[in-house]
Image (spheres, rainbow, N blue to C red):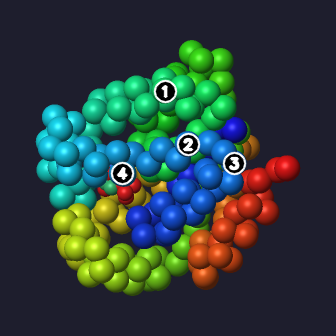
Amino acid sequence: MRVVFMGPPGAGKGTQAAVLASRLGIPHISTGDIFRANVAEGTELGKQAQQFMDAGEYVPDSVTNAMVRDRLTHDDCRPGFLLDGYPRTVEQVAELDAMLRSAGHALDVVVELTVDIDEVVARLVKRAQEQGRTDDTEDVLRRRLEVYGEQTAPLIDTYFQRGILVQVDGMGLIEEVTERLFAVVVVD
Ligand code: AMP
């Protein structure tokens, strides 16, 4: 199964994506996690990404696309994958389409976790305090939400038009959201 997971920062996307991927038996590929690991290890990729992440901006498409292209060639992606946080721009959608097409594959489903924006801001501020993430100061948070609205929210319509979008209410307890997700995505 090939799944894309979308939703604004703070929607609880990472947590739900990990649970769903594990349930489906496919790798959970979070571009944000890969970037953070590279920043922590001080790799060349990490150096290229950090300034953008710290400012709440997107890492350039050329860098992000190359990273995902490489990741999807790993053996563990053969039965499928769950992409969390990619694609996030129109260009990334086109690039992912090209990667899939050349492998003779297609996306099965795009999941959008929907949330109340006030709730999202409250969650993000709380997470910033708890984790001390350098990309989670209040100004940066606002910028991240703005960038999501400008560049990523429009992609939802693209996938809706293709008939593969599934929207799941992301509000409420983690377990409740997981249950809703499984009800619409997991087919035994
Ligand atoms: P996330 O943990 O998914 O919210 O990602 C954290 C940060 O990593 C984002 O704010 C971006 O700076 C960067 N990032 C993650 N995924 C992408 C992507 N698909 N395109 C560009 N930048 C990304």
The reply to whether residue 155 is visible in this rendering is: no
Which image quadrant: the N terminus? top right
Neighbor class of circle 4 (other Cα within 10 Å; few <14, some 14-19, many 20+) is some
Q: Position of residue 137 (x, y in %)?
A: 21, 73
Whether residue 117 sits left or right of residue 32 in the image: it is: right
Task: Determine the secondary structure under disc 1.
Answer: loop
Say whether marks 4 and 1 touch (CB < 8 Å): no
Looking at the image, is mark 4 or mark 1 earlier in the sequence?
Answer: 4
Task: Determine the secondary structure under disc 4.
Answer: helix
Query: Which picture quadrant has residue 144?
Result: bottom left
Numbered label attached to residue 24: 3
Asked if 65 appears above or below 39 in the picture, the reply is above
Numbered label attached to residue 32: 4
Residue at the disc numbered 2: 27
Q: Position of residue 111 (x, y in %)?
A: 63, 54
Say whether marks 1 and 2 touch (CB < 8 Å): yes
Numbered label attached to residue 74: 1
Label 4 residue near ligand 1, CB within 8 Å = yes
Looking at the image, is mark 3 or mark 1 earlier in the sequence?
Answer: 3
Residue at image point 41% right, 65% down: 9
Residue at image point 77% right, 59% down: 184
- Is 90 or 135 nearer to us in this picture? 135
Amino acid identity at mark 3: Leu
Query: In front of the other: label 4 or label 1?
Result: 1
- Is 126 or 74 nearer to us in this picture? 74
Query: In front of the other: label 3 or label 4?
Result: 3
Say whether marks 3 and 1 touch (CB < 8 Å): no
Amino acid identity at mark 1: His
Neighbor class of circle 1 (other Cα within 10 Å; few <14, some 14-19, many 20+) is few
Q: Position of residue 169 (x, y in %)?
A: 65, 71
Task: Determine the secondary structure under disc 2.
Answer: loop
